[in-house]
């Protein structure tokens, strides 16, 4: 989390590289404990590169299936190890495919700016 320097009133906010590394570690730890995870990524200001002090991390997790309603799925994911405040959207594969097929504004945003953290891309490109 952001820290206040003891000798100053300045808040030191983690930069995008630190947030990306922490998010990647979080995604891998999550995937080790949740075999239903298909993909993990982030979108929003950190993905676009226009983050700043106070920016949160917008995460998306795609799972093979879930018995919980969409509105309740995020409550089960521990985000405390991330260095900035974070929110997570958890979609099933079917919901993700439907969202992409509908092609609305939010789906287009997710399609164009999500930085995928898990699984690793063999080509090295995370978008």
Image (cartoon, rainbow, N blue to C red):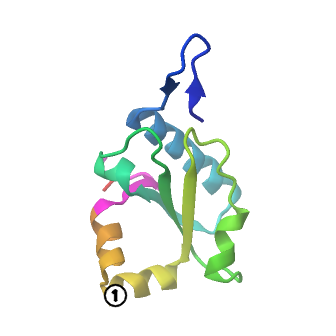
> Looking at the image, which residue sits at the far front?
9
Kindly identify which residue carries mark 1. 101
Quick check: can you spot residue 125? no
Decide whether residue 123 is among the magenta residues.
yes
Nearer the observer, 18 or 31 = 18
Magenta-drawn segment: 113-124
Q: Quadrant of residue 63?
A: bottom right
109 on left or right of 96: left
* Quarter of the figure that contains the C terminus: bottom left
Quick check: can you spot residue 12? yes
Q: Give x and y (percent) for residue 124.
A: 31, 46
What's the residue at 30%, 78% (across, down)?
A: 105
| Residue 63 vertical placement versus 85 (above, below) | below
Picture mark count: 1
* Quarter of the figure that contains the N terminus: top right
Q: Give x and y (percent) for residue 93.
A: 50, 79
Q: Give x and y (percent) for residue 27.
A: 56, 51
- Secondary structure of the residue carrying tag 1 is helix
What's the residue at 52%, 45% (across, down)?
A: 23
Nearer the observer, 118 or 111 = 111
Decide whether residue 106 is among the magenta residues.
no
| Residue 49 vertical placement versus 102 (above, below) | above
Q: Quadrant of residue 113?
A: bottom left
For mark 1, does the 10 Å Cα neighbourhood hold few (<14), some (14 to 19), or many (20 or more) residues? few
What's the residue at 57%, 18% (across, down)?
A: 5
């Amino acid at each position: 989390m952001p820290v206040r320097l003891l000798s100053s009133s300045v808040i030191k906010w983690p930069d995008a590289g630190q947030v990306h590394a922490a998010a990647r570690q979080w995604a891998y730890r999550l995937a080790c404990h949740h075999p239903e995870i298909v993909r993990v990524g982030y979108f929003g200001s950190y993905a676009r590169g226009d983050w700043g002090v106070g920016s949160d991390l917008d995460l998306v997790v795609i799972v093979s299936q879930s018995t919980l309603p969409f509105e309740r799925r995020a409550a089960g994911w521990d985000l405390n190890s991330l260095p900035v405040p974070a929110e997570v959207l958890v979609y099933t594969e079917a919901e993700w495919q439907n969202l992409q097929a509908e092609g609305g504004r939010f789906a287009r945003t997710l399609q164009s700016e999500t930085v995928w953290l898990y699984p690793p891309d063999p080509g090295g490109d995370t978008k």
